[in-house]
Image (cartoon, grey):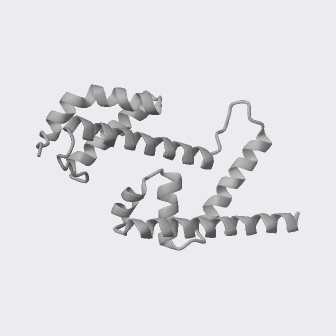
Amino acid sequence: MTALPPIHELYRQQRQRALAVVRRIVKDADEAEDVVQDVFVRLYSKDVHFDGKAACTTWLHRILINSSINSLRARKRRGRLETPLGLGEDPEARAVGNERHAMLLEALQHLSEQHRLVVTLRDVRGYSYPDIARMLNLPEGTVKSALNRGRTRLAKVMAGHDLQEHAAG
């Protein structure tokens, strides 16, 4: 069984390689830096266990790839929820975007605290299921279930809001 070197030494030795690996996946230097820092913070805080079955560099490479993929998924989710305001966007489109954002915030208030937290952490902030489970001290299955129920409830609340607007208009 291979021992893991001290984290500060591993970081010093592997940082440049780690950045190169992550940059190739996320295609953004700033995001790559964030992913690498997050990985090493998790390693330092002992949230990740090295079992010694593979070389330390192989193990680290796998963690970096998985974290990069999670970051891409989070970026995609954020992209669906955020309405970018372009410079050439007309005032009507901006007003609709602002109205939808306000509607989402209002609809979130109709969820239970647990569902609101899980939906916000996953869909708005982009945290992974294991991260959310650790933050909220819940089993990962409970997080997935709460996310599903929260999303379903949120969709119903927002659909009801749309129906009310159409009936009033």
Towards the viewer: 166 or 98? 166
Towards the viewer: 144 or 61? 61
Measured as percent of width and height from the top left, residue 123 is found at: 53, 54
Please give left or right for residue 117 compared with residue 134 in the image.
right
- In this rendering, the answer to whether 4 lies above or below 88 is below
Please give left or right for residue 146 compared with residue 102 in the image.
left
In which quarter of the view is residue 155 placed?
A: bottom right
Measured as percent of width and height from the top left, residue 140 is found at: 39, 65
Towards the viewer: 16 or 2? 2
- In this rendering, the answer to whether 141 lies above or below 1 is below
Q: Indicate the quadrant containing the C terminus: top left, top right, bottom left or bottom right.
A: bottom right
In which quarter of the view is residue 166 placed?
A: bottom right
Please give left or right for residue 166 compared with residue 141 in the image.
right
Q: Residue at coordinates 47% horizontally, 50% vertically from top-left?
A: 126
- In this rendering, the answer to whether 91 lies above or below 102 is above
Number of numbered discs present? 0
Measured as percent of width and height from the top left, residue 92 is found at: 79, 43
Please give left or right for residue 108 compared with residue 30 in the image.
right
Towards the viewer: 57 or 162? 57
- In this rendering, the answer to whether 67 lies above or below 149 is above
Q: Residue at coordinates 49% horizontally, 41% vertically from top-left?
A: 72
Q: Residue at coordinates 34% horizontally, 29% vertically from top-left?
A: 19
Q: Residue at coordinates 34% horizontally, 39% vertically from top-left?
A: 64
